Image (cartoon, rainbow, N blue to C red):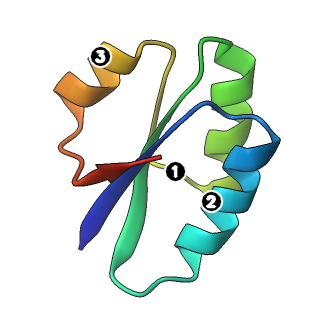
Amino acid sequence: MIKVGIIGCGKMADKHANGIKRIPDVEIAAVCDRELLMAQDMNERFNIPKYFTDVQEMLQTVKLELFT
């Protein structure tokens, strides 16, 4: 399983998440946005395991193979 992280939870992030969700053997493992409510909202809408407001914390906490 390839683990992907999304940095920034604006309109383009929704498009990325919708596309990534359709790819077999790829999982969105975490999202990050400096606005906590944006990260929480995306976490809930796309059922993403972890969300963060700090990119460094996300990269240190979750082993990601790719991020967008």
Q: Which of the two marks, 1 or 2, is nearer to us in this view?
A: 2
Examine the image and state in which quarter residue 33 appears.
top right
Which residue is located at x 69 percent, y 41 percent? 42
Residue where numbered disc 1 is placed: 48
The kind of residue on which mark 2 rests is: Ala
Q: Whole-Å distance between the Cαs marked 2 and 3?
A: 21 Å
Above/below status of 54 relative to 11? above
Q: Position of residue 43 (x, y in %)?
A: 61, 42
SS of the residue under disc 2: helix
SS of the residue under disc 1: loop
Side (left or right) of 42 relative to 56: right
Side (left or right) of 11 relative to 13: right
Residue where numbered disc 3 is placed: 57
Above/below status of 13 relative to 39? below
Side (left or right) of 54 relative to 47: left
Q: Position of residue 50 (x, y in %)?
A: 43, 38
Q: Position of residue 29 (x, y in %)?
A: 38, 51
Q: Whole-Å distance between the Cαs marked 3 and 1?
A: 16 Å
Which of the numbered marks, if any, corresponds to residue 17?
Answer: 2
The kind of residue on which mark 3 rests is: Glu
